[in-house]
């Protein structure tokens, strides 16, 4: 007869933390595959079920699913007081992974009945909702589990592992915001494209709010240690550049310009590391103002609907983007700055709530 394997409470705690990280990592992989897939569609590349973006997406779902199972069983073995602290996050993770896995058959059903679907189709919203639930719940589990370790004066592996959770939330929520702002949802049977004016207003407020919020949380969760927020912002730029810019040969010359976005991210991080709280809030205006550069090239399609009215061919994307810069940027700079400030205030409230537990 084989031996029964048993784990100590410390080992269950380690499994819970590790599985939470892996759920976030799985969602992060899904977002990378999804972003790459959007780019392939824009470039009119032939699509197959086993295309590289799809393969990455399915691998991410598999990682998130397996990790959710481990997370649940490790949580079940916690003592009751600790179990209750993480109960809501575990339940949200399970709900999120159920939605995420269910999005596959739903998408197959949609394609079978309605052909090609747009970015804002119900199956895609189903998928993104599952990603946001999984990533947000797992990030919360990571922070609550690591509070004491994140508060230490020196850097530890926990300070860098939390980056995975933050990036998963940033990228999955960005995917949701793209769905309500990009004109990629007009298909044979349905036109879910957002109204162009709504799309511009939404983009100008939602993206700066989100980016500033995540950068603020990146700094706040580690007690203002310089470097973590810079890494989160820089990794976002690298992922976006890899999936949305480098895939289009016409956009490769813009990579040097795009990575200038690292500078305001570092400035924001430095301000949060050294400034008083009121100045920290005001610092949110910096990533807010720069959102127009962070989310290049896809937001070109959003503002083009009102400001340029051109066909955004892959070879024309950069030209149209820079042509609009002179007219778009002066109009969005103030509301984007205010949205960034509001994002830091909102993130401050969220951080205080999580760190107190």
Image (tube, helix red, strand yellow):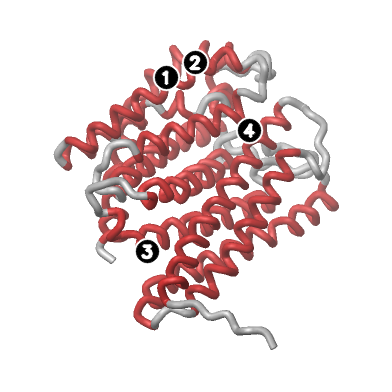
**What kind of element bears circle 3?**
helix
**Of pointers 1 and 4, the one earlier in the residue sequence:** 4
73 relative to 233 in the view: left or right: right
Task: Give the percent coordinates (x, y) of residue 314.
Answer: 68, 19
Vertically, is 38 above or below 68?
A: above
**Of pointers 3 and 2, the one earlier in the residue sequence:** 3
Badge 2 density bin: few <14, some 14–19, many ≥20, Cα 10 Å: few
Identify the residue position indicated by label 1 in the image.
260
Give the mark toward the camera: 2 or 4: 2
Give the mark toward the camera: 3 or 1: 3
Badge 1 density bin: few <14, some 14–19, many ≥20, Cα 10 Å: few
Vertically, is 248 above or below 26?
A: above
Query: Marks 2/1: CA distance?
Result: 7 Å
Q: Quadrant of the N terminus?
A: bottom right
Residue 123 can be seen in this image: yes
**What kind of element bears circle 4?**
loop
Query: Marks 3/4: CA distance?
Result: 40 Å
- Label number found at residue 145: 3
Give the mark toward the camera: 3 or 4: 3
- Label number found at residue 183: 4
Q: Are marks 3 and 2 in contact (CB under 8 Å)?
A: no
Q: Are marks 2 and 1 in contact (CB under 8 Å)?
A: yes
Identify the residue position indicated by label 2 in the image.
256
Task: Give the percent coordinates (x, y) of residue 238.
Answer: 52, 30
Q: Are marks 3 and 4 in contact (CB under 8 Å)?
A: no
- Which quadrant of the figure has residue 87? bottom left
Badge 4 density bin: few <14, some 14–19, many ≥20, Cα 10 Å: many
Query: Marks 3/2: CA distance?
Result: 39 Å
Q: Are marks 1 and 4 in contact (CB under 8 Å)?
A: no
Query: Marks 1/4: CA distance?
Result: 27 Å
């Amino acid at each position: 007869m084989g031996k029964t394997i048993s784990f100590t409470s410390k080992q269950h705690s380690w499994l819970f933390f590790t599985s939470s990280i892996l759920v976030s990592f799985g969602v992060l992989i899904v977002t990378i595959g999804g972003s790459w897939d959007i780019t392939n569609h824009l470039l009119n590349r032939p699509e197959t079920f086993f295309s590289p973006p799809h393969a990455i997406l399915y691998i991410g779902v598999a990682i998130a699913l397996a990790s959710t199972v481990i997370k649940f069983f490790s949580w079940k073995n916690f003592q009751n007081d600790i179990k209750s602290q993480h109960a809501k996050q575990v339940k949200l993770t399970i709900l999120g992974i159920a939605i995420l896995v269910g999005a596959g058959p739903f998408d197959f059903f949609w394609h079978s009945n309605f052909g090609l679907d747009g970015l804002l189709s119900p199956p895609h919203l189903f998928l993104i909702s599952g990603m946001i639930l999984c990533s947000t719940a797992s990030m919360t589990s990571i922070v609550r589990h690591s509070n004491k370790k994140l508060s230490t004066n020196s850097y530890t592996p926990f300070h860098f592992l939390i980056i995975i959770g933050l990036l998963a939330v940033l990228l999955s929520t960005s995917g949701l915001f793209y769905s309500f702002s990009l004109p990629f949802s007009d298909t044979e049977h349905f036109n879910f494209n957002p109204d162009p004016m709504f799309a511009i207003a939404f983009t100008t407020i939602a993206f700066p709010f989100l980016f500033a919020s995540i950068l603020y949380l990146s700094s706040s969760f580690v007690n203002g240690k310089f470097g973590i927020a810079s890494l989160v912002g820089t990794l976002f730029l690298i992922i976006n550049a890899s999936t949305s810019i480098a895939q289009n040969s016409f956009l490769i010359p813009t990579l040097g310009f795009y990575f200038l976005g690292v500078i305001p991210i570092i400035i924001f991080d430095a301000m949060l590391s050294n400034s008083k709280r009121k100045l920290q809030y005001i610092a949110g205006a910096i990533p807010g103002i720069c959102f127009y550069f962070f989310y290049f090239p896809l937001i070109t399609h959003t503002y083009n609907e009102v400001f340029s009215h051109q066909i955004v061919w892959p070879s024309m994307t950069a030209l149209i983007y820079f042509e609009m810069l002179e007219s778009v940027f002066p109009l969005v700079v103030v509301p984007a700055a205010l949205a960034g400030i509001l994002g830091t205030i909102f993130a401050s409230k969220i951080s205080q709530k999580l760190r107190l537990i």
